[in-house]
Image (tube, rainbow, N blue to C red):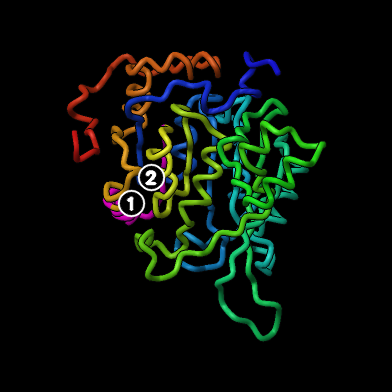
Amino acid sequence: MNKDSIKHKSSLDFTIPERTNCVLLNKDCLELLKSIPDESVQLILIDPPYNLDLAEWDTFNNYISWASKWIEESYRVLSKSGSMVIFGGTQFQGEKSGDLIEIIHYLRHHTKFRLVNTVVWYYKNGMSAHRYFANRHEEAIWLTKTDKYYFDLDSVRIPYGEKELQEALRDKRLIPENVMKGKNPTNVWEIGRLNGNSLERVGHPTQKPLEIIRRFVKALSYPDSIVLDFFAGSGTTGRVCIEEKRNCIMCDTDKQSDMFFAKHIENMKKTEMNQPFIENDSLRSFFNGIKNRGTKEYIHQLQLNFEVPALTIPTSSYQRVANSAL
């Protein structure tokens, strides 16, 4: 393998930053996207509204017309080695729904995105049903911009059981070194949904488990790279990025997102995953923070040139260290 190519690197090939940068903004996703530099984001990870009229933020007259705008901007800001993950489902009926089938159809016929995988999130707990088979899964599609995408399988391998390990080591088709690292989790992930009394809960109605977000973040981004979630919701992506030493940009039109994210940080501080980070209050300060930290490795790998305005706001007015130990 050509280890000079980011396609063949893993998280072990990157410098771990002491602290990362994070920003959560209360604004429309298109307004945010248009302010992000070309090819500056390694991973876009979103759980968009499904147009099910759950609330004002989940109601659209023409869903695909609206979605096409953020899909186009996402392609622009995504790095050549980057990935985009869109959560959704195929069980939503009706022309105006945000069904993944509709999104995939649009992606295939109107964009250059490549569909690498459909990941099935399987769970045992859910609502009962009497007029159809009870639903026990959701989907997420994994898209890339090129065939030279970054993918760190080793970081998300699942350990073999003792019996499984011995059988795998006897299989001549498998490389013993990789077997010892663990097995590929496949594209069907059995991860329980969050119960009402889950310690992960922060109050958001469609909150995803940390484990799901963590697997995508670890496999498709690397330390000190930038992850973008422009439907931040509960802020789960931001918490995982802080814990895994990635920089994160988030936005949501729901003003409660600040409260949800603050709860995540409060919960994080009670765990061994607690990590120091700098919380920014603007996109300018976010990119200035990364540039001033001198993350030369990341900028070099993606051939970036962040054009940050010459006027730099004093650090004390836009950054605060969000770690109780500091």
Q: Are marks 2 and 1 in contact (CB under 8 Å)?
A: yes
Amino acid, disc 1: His
Q: In terms of secondary structure, where does tag 1 sit?
A: helix
The span picked out in magenta is 247-266
Tag of residue 264: 1
Residue at point 64% right, 16% down?
3
Whole-percent x, y for residue 91 in the image: 67, 67
Q: Which image quarter holds the C terminus?
A: top left
Residue at point 31% right, 48% down?
271
Whole-percent x, y for residue 103 in the image: 68, 51
Q: Is residue 102 above or below residue 1?
A: below
Q: Crowding at label 1, few (<14), some or many (≥20) Cα neighbours within 10 Å?
A: many
Residue at point 35% right, 37% down?
23
Total residue callouts: 2
Q: Is residue 216 above or below residue 97?
A: above
Amino acid, disc 2: Arg
Q: Residue 238 sits in which quadrant?
A: top left
